[in-house]
Image (cartoon, helix red, strand yellow):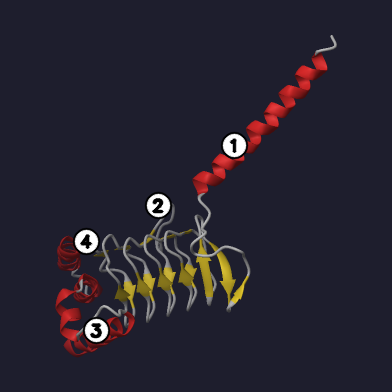
Amino acid sequence: MLKEYFGQLKEDVKCIRERDPAATSALEVLLLYPGLKAVRAYRKAHWFYKHDMHFIARYISQRAAKQTNIEIHPGAKIGKRFFIDHGTGVVIGETAEVGDDVTIYQGVTLGGTGKDVGKRHPTVGDGVMIGAGAKVLGPFKIGNNTNIAAGSVVLHEIPENSTAVGTPARVIKRDGIRIDNLDQINIPDPVQQEIDRLTKRIESLEEQIKSYQESRKGE
């Protein structure tokens, strides 16, 4: 157990130094990065969880959540070289599965919808990046090497080698080919979309009223 734990810890520190230009040393990463602290606690808690010592597992995970504001359920399955950048507000549910070489940012939720039983949380493939504030909700898969834009809400499966944006998220690029005109900056605002829809409806009704009034003038 210890050999595996320290081997994974070494890989986690190395991947953070490679992906975060602000990381100046391995010691800084090891002692000062809340994302790494949360992952270290998760790996301990997960070992106890797998051996049916759920109270100890939850104690470790909840203590880490209070210290880092990152909540990872000990029942989740997380692969190698997992990087939580910044990390504040990250939540990972019990049945979530995360592959190798995944990066997620602050405010990300790998959660459920409350409608499923058993497998309730998403499965995230290898090499996935999930941007700040994104919510991935439900027991579906995010394919390998996919990017989820910041602020997106993902409610269905996303294929591998894709870029998905929006609320709800939809694929705009796959295998390097753009299939939609959206980009990660010009993500549609659902509130504004609804306002525009209502505005068009009001204009249509006003035209109908005007036509009706004109038809009644000759009576």
Identity of the residue drawn at 19% across and 87% down: 6
Q: Which mark, residue 114?
A: 2
* Amino acid at dot 1: Leu
- Left or right: residue 39 versus residue 210 is left
Q: Say whether disc 1 or disc 3 marks the residue closer to the N-terminus.
A: 3
**Which residue was labeled with disc 4?**
69
Secondary element at image label 2: loop
Residues at marks 3 and 4 touching, judged by CB atoms closer than 8 Å: no
How far apart are labels 1 and 2 at the CA level? 31 Å
In the rendered image, residue 92, in percent from the top left (x then y), is placed at 32, 64
Numbered disc 3: secondary structure? helix
Measured as percent of width and height from the top left, residue 148 is found at 46, 67
Mark 1 in CB contact with mark 4 (< 8 angstroms): no
Residue bearing the label numbered 1: 198
Q: Which type of secondary structure does the marked residue at label 1 adopt?
A: helix
Query: Within 10 Å of the Cα at label 4, are there few (<14), some (14-19), or many (20+) other Cα atoms?
Result: many
Question: On the rendered structure, is 3 left or right of 216?
Answer: left
Task: Answer few, some or many: residues within 10 Å of disc 2's Cα (few below 14, many 20 plus, some between 14 and 19).
Answer: few
Of labels 2 and 3, earlier in sequence is: 3
First of labels 1, 2 by sequence position: 2
Q: Nearer the viewer, mark 4 or mark 2?
A: 4
CA–CA distance in space, label 2 to label 3: 35 Å
The reply to whether the C-beta atoms of the residues labelled 2 and 3 are less than 8 Å apart is: no
- Residue to which mark 3 is pinned: 13
| Disc 1 and disc 2 in contact, CB within 8 angstroms | no
Describe residue 122's horizontal placement relative to residue 46 as left or right.
Answer: right
Q: Quadrant of the C terminus?
A: top right
Residue type at tag 3: Val
